[in-house]
Amino acid sequence: MSRAPYQGVDGHVGDTPLIRLSRLSKLTGCEILGKAEFMNPGGSVKDRAAYGIITDAEKQRLLQPSGTIIEGTAGNTGIGLTMIGHARGYRTVIVIPETQSPEKISLLRTLGAEVITVPEKPYRDPENYNHIARRLAEERGWFWANQFDNTSNREAHYRSTGPEIWKQTKGQVSAFVASVGTGGTLAGATLYLKKQNPKVAAVCPDPYGAAMWSWFTNGNTDTNDGDSFAEGIGQSRVTKNIEGITVDQAYRIDDQTALTIICQLLRNQHRRRRPLRQGTWPRPDHRHHSLRLRAQVSVKTF
C-alpha cells in the first residue's frame, strides 16, 4: 500500500537538520553541531519520546481508541503527548509542578490538554507530580505515559535520533552530548551510535543540583549539591531509561556559564540585525525568567 501523500502532525516528528554552531566550532577547532529539535511539531526533542510512547502503547493495546493519556511532566513532554495524542484521537491530562513557567501551562491548555498543577515535591514524596499521575491512571483506567521509566522513550531515540545523526554526519560523529531529564535522549542515541562505532563518546553535562554527574562519575547519587533555574533537566534518581547506560565523560555546568554561552551564541546569530553592546545583560529583575528561557534553548540545541 502506498503511503498517503499528506500526514497529520504525528507524521512529522524527527528528521530535523543538524546546524553548525559556527562560533563554538571556530573557538574550539571542532565541528560542533546542534540537532534542531525545535523544528518538531511541538517544538522540542520530547516529541520523539511522545510519539514512541504512544505508538508502542497502541501496538501493545495498552491505549484504546478515544482513550485518555495522563503524564506527569515539566512541560515539553506534555506538549508532545497532547499534540500527537490529539492527532491520533486521544484525550490528554497533564500533571505539572506549579513552579514551571506560566507559558508552558498556558500553551498546554491552549492545545487542549486538561492541566492539573500541583506543588513541587521531590520524587520520594508521595505527592510528587509523577506519583499523582500514576495514581490517577490506576483509579480511572487511563494510560500513564510514564516517560521516566517507560523505555519506549529511549527506544524512540534509538530508532530515530541516533540513526539520523549517524546518517547526517556520514558516520563521522565522534561524540554525542545531552543533558538528562528522563535520560531517554542520551541513552537511546548513545546506544545506537556506539553500536555503529564504540569510539563515539557519550557525554552528559548536568546542572548543579542534579545527581547524574555523581552517578556517572562515582557510581552513586550522593552528590546532589547546588541548585539551578534550568527547567526540564536535572535528575536526582536513576530512571529505567538510564539504567545500564555508561558515559565517557560527565560535567556539572553552573547556570551563569550556560547563560553566558547561550547569550554569545544568540549575539553571534543576530549580530548583523541587532548587535549587542559589549557587556550587555538582561536587567537584574528579569534575570531568573531570562535564565529559564535560555537554559531551555541550551537543552534543545547542544
Image (tube, grey):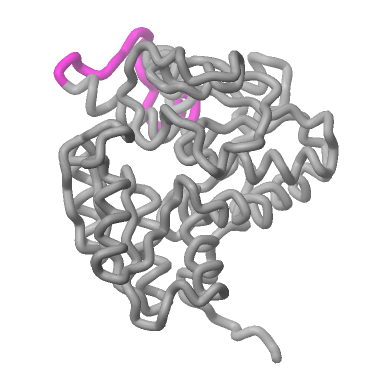
x, y percentage for residue 48? 53, 55
> Residue farthest to the top?
279
**Residue for point 33% across, 55% down:** 71
Q: Quadrant of the C terminus?
A: top right
**Residue for point 60% across, 37% down:** 243
Q: Is residue 68 above or below residue 134?
A: below
Going by the image, does 228 lie left or right of 214?
A: left
- Is 242 or 40 nearer to us in this picture? 242
Q: Which residues are magenta?
A: 268-285
In which quarter of the view is residue 89 placed? Answer: bottom left
Magenta segment, prevailing SS (helix, strand or loop): loop
Q: Is residue 101 above or below residue 163?
A: above
**Residue for point 30% across, 47% down:** 131
| Mark count | 0
- Is 268 or 159 nearer to us in this picture? 159
Q: Quadrant of the N terminus?
A: bottom right
Going by the image, does 222 lie left or right of 136?
A: right
Q: Is residue 272 magenta?
A: yes
**Residue for point 32% across, 46% down:** 130
- Is 106 or 119 nearer to us in this picture? 119
x, y percentage for residue 279? 35, 8
In which quarter of the view is residue 141 placed? Answer: bottom left
x, y percentage for residue 194? 78, 38
x, y percentage for residue 15? 62, 57
Q: Is residue 210 magenta?
A: no
